[in-house]
Amino acid sequence: MTKSWSRENTCVQCSNGRCTTAFHTTCAFIAGVVFETSDWPYPVYITCHKHAAAPKEKSRMRPVTEVNEGDRVLAKHKNGRYYWSEVTDIKRQTYYEVDFEDGSFSDNLFPEDIESRDCRQEGPPLEGQQVQVRWTDGELYGAVFRQVNCQDMYTIEFEDGSFMTYKRQDLWADGEELPKYVKSRMSAATERKYDCFYSEVVKDKRRPKHKISYLKMLG
């Protein structure tokens, strides 16, 4: 059946390299496609599931150094750019890992997200056990339980005063090698957001007009 495209069927495309993956905006949002605010030429940076998983896979395998409270780290801000920030708190968190029936996965579910079992009272499911997961959209999804994932979570403060929490693999400490996708999106915080617009303004530099004598014109 041929689809008739209209303004109501607007599609968006993955912003990663030459990726041609396209999808309806609302469908992609419901499916968990990553939408981030960014800079020109991508005011909204869109990442399909394939490319969203690739950086995570690389970060799991990379060597990391010990990070403590007060240390300086590079992290991704909510605007999609990477900034240097300070670690303010470190806490141990228990997550559950599952594989969903549609081929996607999650490695950061809370025990209470498992709807088909009282994990607080009975403990985690057995590896390979079928479970029902209550997702962030309020719907139930079938999945297979894989393992318990205990890891330290790092709360950091950016220079704009905002706080966010990350896994260690999502942070880069001083001296660690930065991947290309991080280097390409690094930014430096400034006190004045629009300095770039004011620094080029030169006052009182208009080209002077030459006065023409009225008598000279008559002569």
Image (spheres, rainbow, N blue to C red):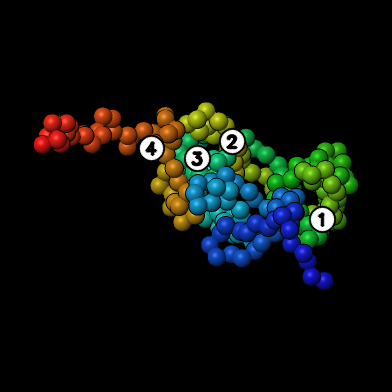
In this orientation, does residue 31 appear? no
Badge number at residue 143: 1
> Which residue does the image show at 26% across and 34% down from the upper left?
206
Which residue type carries mark 2? Answer: Met
Badge number at residue 196: 4
Where is residue 56 drawn, in percent x and y?
59, 54
Between the residue at mark 4 and the residue at mark 2, the CA separation in whole angstroms equals: 27 Å
Between the residue at mark 3 and the residue at mark 2, the CA separation in whole angstroms equals: 16 Å
Choose mark 1 or mark 4, whichever is in front: 4
Decide which of tag 4 and tag 2 comes sooner along the chain.
2
Q: Nearer the viewer, residue 1 or 177?
A: 1
> Which residue does the image show at 47% across and 31% down from the upper left?
159
Badge number at residue 164: 2
How many residues crowd around disc 4 within 10 Å: few (fewer than 14), some, or many (20 or more)?
Answer: few
Where is residue 207 drawn, in percent x and y?
23, 36
Which residue type carries mark 1? Answer: Ala
Between the residue at mark 1 and the residue at mark 4, the CA separation in whole angstroms equals: 50 Å
SS at circle 4: helix
Decide which of tag 3 and tag 2 comes sooner along the chain.
3
Q: Quick check: 153 left or right of 10?
A: left
Which residue matches tag 3?
A: 67
